[in-house]
Image: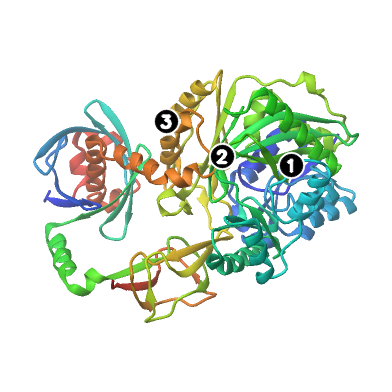
Amino acid sequence: MSKLIFSCGKESKFVQINDDSTFQIDEKKYYFELLDANKDFFLIKLNNKIFEVFVQRNGLNNYFIDVNGLKFNTELTTYLEYRAKEISMDSDEYKHEIEIKAPMPGLILKVNKSKGEKVKKGESVLILEAMKMENDLKAGENGIVKDIFVNEGVTVEKGVTLFSIVKHD
Amino acid sequence: MFQKILIANRGEIALRVIRACRELGIKSAAIYSEADKASLHTRLADESYYIGESVSSKSYLNKEKIIKLAKEINADAIHPGYGFLSENPDFIKLVEDSKIVFIGPSSESVRLMGNKTEARKLMFKSKVPIVPGTTEPIKSFEDGIKTAREIGYPVLLKAAAGGGGKGMRKVFSDEEFRSSFESTSREAAKAFVDDSIYIEKLLVNPRHIEVQILGDKFGNYVHLFERECSIQRRHQKIIEESPSPVISEKIREQITSAAIDAAKACNYYNAGTVEFLLDSEKQFYFLEMNTRLQVEHPVTEWITGIDLVKEQILIASGNKLRYKQKEISSHGHAIECRIYAEEPGENFLPSTGIILHYREPSGNGIRVDSGFTQNSEISIHYDPLISKLIVWSDDRISAINKMKSALFEYRIAGVIHNIPLLQSIMNHYDYEKGNFHINFLEERLAELSGKIEQDKRSDELKASATLAASLNRNFKSSKMNEKVSDTFNNWTNQLYE
């Protein structure tokens, strides 16, 4: 099996499964035993401890992992994919534009800003109502609203891009 | 005694009532919405009836339909659980007029206590201490801002018809007043159909202490001691315990007798809870009365040995209270953690999805009241409470240790939940010392989340996560649903392409 790159937050490491009982993360070698497995559940023995690991694959490369109740949002890519992303991240536009996605399904109750408007970090851009609660979606950075993709009164699914902000101090 | 009780609720509380019915030999009838057709409560009730579409207004909030159904199936009583129609005086009045017994207080008591400004007026008259502020709803934005200045910032804007933490906002300055006023009215109108709001002085870091009471239809009252519910987020409790670690015998006497005075003032019967705020000077103030069964009632059940839902049913059927005050005592220490599908790191936004794996903790002194099981869906339509984990032990510290152990055992995969945060709180020095208030969680969130991140830095944990992701990526699609446990000898060949 070829090497893959495992990214979690800012950390990226090479991972390679060598055989039935060993794998490697960067230079470090681990001995393991796979006690049970199906598509989204793996029972792994490492250093005489047993870990219950749940894996939900989200799209091509994103994995949502739950180990003993702790959650990891991760990405697993081939080296080529990883490099391609690095290169695109270096381009200016990518670096400065932030897209805000719906954290959960709900109703767009109010849009407080319009396209082209200046926003300060922490200012409310729109209000998403879900489960009878109003959730203020705020600008994460000082900047300009580049685009708003939704209107008041619209119902959105989780993960839909709501608005984008171009960083500007 | 009743023959059949219709349960106008869903989730863990519907199950709680079903169990009490079964123990008392009463038939239980569940109702369910489209989204709940496979839910646990429909499976465990004696009878289950479809009530309407997933959205609450067409199902669990549809008063007329629920009452019509109750008549058709010859239910002689309705248990409302908590939330939904439990504190809706119009619904209760309709039930009363249909000659069906409502398992709870009278519509009049609920109307009196449901309007927060009316309740404040009544408490003031009955010499139950109230938080400084208005006893009338504010008429306009201008009127409000003037009052806020008089009371002095910070103030709290609250929906007069509110409860359950919804329709409530802290305001620290004139500048914030307008937008807070607007969104509070909007939320109030949406959640309670009544947009009137009032202003209270915001007490600095008080504790939330509440008293459980029971009253019968003959004017007899008892209290079942206090519950400490200061660990909250979005004004909603997530951890409750009894006894409170800071209440002295003297204050316990005062606060429980104030609670009974509050209940008497509105001619209350059935189970109810009087909520108070306790300031750092150990002064307590009436906050509101919850005229229903509380989410956290198991904590009280455990320290007193009294089954509150059974008592509710017995009182509603016309029995006198079975206990005198002196026969009720408190033993040991109980703690409840509410397990929510939500993301503490994202401002506690509710999380939705299918529960892929579910395993409850068990053992001596552990109780789980859950409404879900494997493959259940946490849907956008309802409250994201998955379950309640309650533990009991001889004293507070051993109860905390038991809770830590139970949380460690609890596995819920597929939806994001707050178990790691609850663990982090249980391990916090100030929680252990009983040194906290209603803003504790909000103020310490960064510190508590930091502790979770630290736990995640374990090398073995990360290594097993990495390995599992790699294994999943290479899982052969044809083998997707097949267990591989019997092919271990050469599993790499089975798994990989």
Q: Do labels 1 and 3 share a chain?
A: yes
Secondary structure type for disc 2: strand
Tell me which residue sits at (85%, 55%) in the image: B94
Report in which chain the residue with disc 1 lies.
Answer: B
Task: Give the camera-side residue of B21 and B406.
Answer: B406
The mark nearer the N terminus, 1 or 3, is 1
Measure the C-alpha gap from mark 2 to mark 3.
Answer: 16 Å
Q: From the image, state whether disc 1 or disc 3 is nearer to you.
A: 1
On the image, which quarter does residue A142 sit in?
bottom left
Residue under the image location 31 percent in, 37 percent down: B455
Q: Which chain is home to disc 3?
A: B
Task: Quickly name the residue at label 3.
Answer: B429
Picture layout, residue B126 above or below residue B154: above
The image quadrant where one finds the C terminus of chain A is bottom left
The image shows residue A76 at horizontal and vertical percentages of 22, 53
* Residue lying at 83% horizontally and 47% vertically, measured from the top left: B109
Q: Are marks 1 and 3 in contact (CB under 8 Å)?
A: no
Residue that extends furthest to the bottom in the rendered view of this protein: A116
Rendering quarter of residue A122:
bottom left
Q: What coloring was used for the rendering?
A: rainbow
* Front label number (2 vs 1): 1
In three-dimensional space, the C-alpha distance between marks 2 and 1, rounded to whole angstroms, equals 19 Å
Amino acid at circle 3: Tyr
Task: Identify which amino acid the numbered label 1 is placed on.
Answer: Pro
Q: How crowded is mark 1: few (under 14 residues within 10 Å), some or many (20 or more)?
A: some
Q: Is residue B316 left or right of residue B79?
A: right
- x, y percent for residue A53: 32, 40
Residue B3 shows up from this direction:
no
Pick the residue in front: B287 or B282: B282
| Chain of the residue where label 2 is placed in the rendered structure | B
**Residue B32: % across, % down:** 66, 52
